[in-house]
Amino acid sequence: MASPGSSTGQVTVTTPATANGAVTARAKDGGALSLGLPASSDVTGTEAGKGTVVYPNASKSTDLAIQPTTDGGARTLVVLKDANASSTQRFALNLPQGASLIEDEAGGYEITRETADGVHTTIGTIDAPWAKDANGKPVPTRYELEGSSLVQTVDVNKDTAFPVVADPKFTWGIVTGTAYFKKSETKKIAQNGALTAMAAWALPPGLNAYVTMHSAAITATAYKADVAKKCLKLKFAAGLFIPGQYSGGYCK
């Protein structure tokens, strides 16, 4: 049976009983993210301590492991045991209705949901991938999206020392991250000021506090973005607030 994984009080992570299942993170509001494992064999998982579940030989020359994290997410460790292992791993990504992905400019993705006011706020993240060989040397790796699948490619070569460990990691149900505003919203903030324009918007509580504290900086950044025909974005987290500009994606 599936392991309950771990709970942060806000998010519960559940690991699958076998390698052909999916790891699921469910927030208190019922919203859930699941990531299907890149297995070709229906191997039963075994617990290895601290909530970690291991799936040996889940694919050719490949072991898998899931390790719930304390920030409401999980690491999905892929161990390429030798050169016969596939250098491409495909994870079936299942997002809740209304959620979508945007590149985070660091090689990963932010999972966002549109509020009633049309602002896209972060509800989860997929960290930029990493991979290391048996000597601890970084191995180039990257993500691509193919339909509803997150595809990780690890660039092994004749000099790569096996085994290689790759680590997709996601976090779910967070209330920090980035809020992305469209062009019409950016213009409204630039013309009317952040406090006036955003007063009635249903923003996350943490972002509301930052808007009150930094309204002048938000308004100035929105004005610059509007002049440059770009859009406003607000990165917010504990002790961190960075207003900025972006184009593409939700900037329409």
Image (cartoon, rainbow, N blue to C red):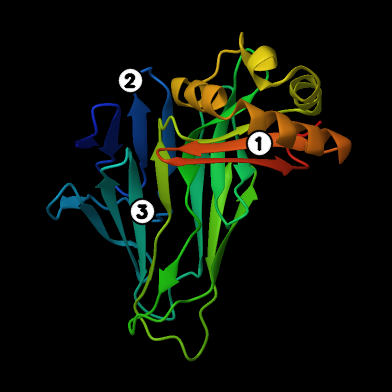
Mark 1 highlights which residue?
Answer: 233
Crowd band around label 1 with a 10 angstrom C-alpha radius: few (<14), some (14–19), many (20+): many
Where on the picture, by quarter, is residue 247? top right
Residue 215 vs residue 236, the one in the foreground: 215
Q: Secondary structure at mark 1?
A: strand
Residue 97: image location, x then y, percent: 56, 22
The residue type indicated by label 1 comes to Lys
Q: Is residue 250 visible?
A: no
Residue 19: image location, x then y, percent: 32, 49
Q: Secondary structure at mark 3?
A: strand
Residue at horizontal 48 percent and vertical 49 percent from the top: 91
Q: Is residue 115 visible?
A: yes
Residue 103 vs residue 217, the one in the foreground: 217
Q: Tell which tag, 2 or 3, sits nearer the viewer.
A: 2
The residue type indicated by label 3 comes to Thr
Mark earlier in primary sequence (2, 3): 2
Left or right: where 164 falls relative to 65 = right
| CA separation in Å, label 1 and label 3 | 30 Å
The reply to whether discs 1 and 3 touch (Cβ–Cβ < 8 Å) is: no
Mark 2 highlights which residue?
Answer: 28
The circle drawn on residue 76 is: 3
| CA separation in Å, label 2 and label 3 | 22 Å
Residue 77 vs residue 231, the one in the foreground: 231
Mark earlier in primary sequence (1, 3): 3
Against 90, is 116 above or below?
Answer: above
Residue at horizontal 81 percent and vertical 24 percent from the top: 187
Left or right: where 45 falls relative to 185 = left
